[in-house]
Image (cartoon, rainbow, N blue to C red):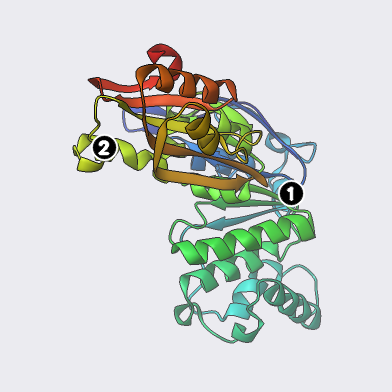
Amino acid sequence: MIVLKDINKTFKLKDKEVTAVRDVNLTIEDKEIYGIIGFSGAGKSTLVRCINLLERPTSGRVIVGGVDMLTLSPKELREQRKKIGMIFQQFNLMPSRTVAQNVALPIENSGLSKEEIARKVNELLAFVELEDRAAAYPSQLSGGQKQRVAIARALATDPEILLCDEATSALDPQTTKSILKLLARLNTELGITVVVITHEMDVIKKLCHRVAVMEHGRVVEENTVYSLFAHPVQEITRNFIHTTSNLSEIYQLIEDKTEIVALDHDEQLVKMRYQETNVSEPLISYISRKFEVTVNILFSDVELVEGKPLGGTVAIIKGGRGQLKQALKYVSQRNVDVEVIKDGTAESVVSKPYAEIA
């Protein structure tokens, strides 16, 4: 549906040039929900605006539905843009128009009769579950309701693609969850390709099929969402993943020298990252019995990503040195990533893979 080839975007600021996007190549499939994540300034919003040419790339090609966007005349581009809806963090609703009038705005000069427009607006408001708010004004709506109106407005031209630029960043967690469900619905029920720009890994985890990670204008990593969470390659990706898991709290506890992470000489503080193939195995129970070690679980975080279980555990394991070594060796052989965060016999050892300790 979308092919970006060698995209570069440079802005001229006074006496210097700033490159926001560098050598980006992406292919987004039809009816896919594709995420682009990065910290502020990574270039992700600039990149997504290159798809509908709100920002024209300095170089490269933008192909949407087989059409090379950069070869179109202004009139042809306006027609092509009708196939690409867009929603924003700040909703961009017109305060002087009612909800129904905001939704009708993109199709007012489309040639449809007033009755046809009214019927379509009612259908769209029903789809976003706001049919009872048609006569309300934006000032009378909650943030989540405003975003639903913005989504209905974006759907008015029957787009094939919906671009979402930080669409949930201004919303509370519960409202964000409902908007993500709505975006998933329009993908499955209407067959719309969705491109999501965000700095929140939790949004990627709950909604997307594939994801690209951007840093300094470049795509530094791309994968399916599950594979990205299971096997992150880049440090920035690992940092993003840490923000969605309570397992990372252990590092703050160590830094604060909290009593709970004070170890005896026969204890090790370990983090175990499970994958789909082993998350349901009773590993903790098994190693306790087989190797006669005591396991005190401090944190556990197992959830579904793309419908498959993924997660981990932080625990203090207590036993003889040989017993600890055998227990962790067994766990690592079960395709579990084992990291010895802290060792009771060497307080300075922090965050080493099991292989380096053993």
Residue sitting at 60 percent across and 74 percent down? 102
Q: Secondary structure at mark 2?
A: helix
| Left or right relative to 225: residue 156 | right
Residue ID for mark 1: 80
Instruction: For residue 135, say whether it is visible.
Output: yes
- Residue 338 % position (x, y): 47, 25
Residue 315 quadrant: top left
Residue sitting at 53 percent across and 45 percent down? 302
* Mark 2: amino acid: Val
Residue ID for mark 2: 261
In this view, the mark in front (1 or 2): 2
Residue 210 quadrant: top right
| Left or right relative to 229: residue 43 | left
Q: Give the mark nearer the N terminus: 1 vs 2.
A: 1
- Residue 80 % position (x, y): 74, 49
In this view, the residue in front, 234 or 199, is: 234
* Mark 1: amino acid: Gln
- Residue 279 % position (x, y): 60, 38
Looking at the image, is 184 positioned above or below residue 231? below
Residue 271 quadrant: top left
| Left or right relative to 274: residue 356 | left
